[in-house]
Amino acid sequence: MDDHGPGNQGDELWRRCVDFHGHECPGLALGYKASRFAMEKLREDRAADEELVAFVENDACFVDAVQVITGCTFGKGNFFYLDYGKIALRLLSRRSGHGVRVSLKKQVHSQDSEHRALMKKIMTGEADGADRARFQELNEKRTREILGKDPRELFHAEKLEGSVPERARIEPSKLCESCGELTMPSKMVVVAEKAMCRPCAEKGSA
């Protein structure tokens, strides 16, 4: 079982995730559990800087918990998005050079027929107030179920081998020779012998 009881560390970390994301939901709970499981596997603490590198394979609620728990963020340059549509996290340690990929077990993702039907009604705009209230009730129940499970019941974990990405590049900005806005030189494109930001370069080549 996870240490998700009142007054303990698990409860505090979960509240941080909820505060960051804005509400409780099953997807956020899965991100919370996956992140803590991956860090446990690597024997790592939350990254203060770039000690860890995270690759998330979806762009849903899951990833907000990953940022809060692992300390990997876009701003630090150690958080990467892979557009795979999978409920999975790859976490790498710069200290040890080891990595782990945590992915959701297929039997965990199943919803009951009522939950699926209500979600469909909400997505199509057919749900009324009672439908939404019932959906929220089921969501809360599912969230609590996830938080109460041992992560090994929820996820597969596999070791990752390979190099860790370079640390985030810090460089002085330069002016785009088209729009005049400050831009990272490594992100600029040369068009007609002018160093431009990508939006300007794309306009010029259109």
Image: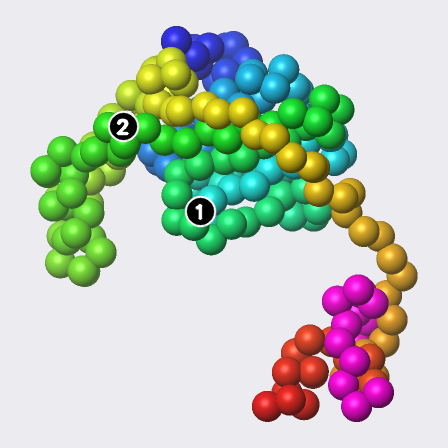
Horizontal side of residue 167 vs 143, given as left or right: right
Q: Give the vertical position of 200 relative to 90 (above or below).
A: below
Which quadrant of the structure image shows residue 90?
top right
Q: Give the range drawn in magenta.
A: 181-193
Q: Give the vertical position of 167 relative to 177 (above or below).
A: above
Q: Position of residue 169 (x, y in %)?
A: 81, 51
Q: Where is residue 52 in the image (x, y as percent from the top left)?
A: 68, 31
* Residue shown at the point (39%, 9%) measured from the top left: 1
Task: For the residues labelled 2 and 1, say whether their Cβ atoms are less than 8 Å apart.
Answer: no
Q: How many marks?
A: 2
* Residue shown at the point (54%, 25%) measured from the top left: 159
Residue 203 lies in the magenta stretch: no
As measured in the structure, the alpha-carbon distance from the residue carrying label 2 to the one carrying label 1 is 17 Å
Q: What residue type is labelled 2?
A: Val
Secondary element at tag 2: helix
Q: Mark 2 points at which residue?
A: 108
Q: Where is residue 69 in the image (x, y as percent from the top left)?
A: 57, 28
Q: Which mark is residue 139?
A: none
Q: Name the residue under label 1.
A: 58
Q: What residue type is labelled 1?
A: Asn
Horizontal side of residue 44 vs 90, given as left or right: right
* Residue shown at the point (39%, 43%) measured from the top left: 86
Q: Where is residue 181 in the image (x, y as percent from the top left)?
A: 79, 76
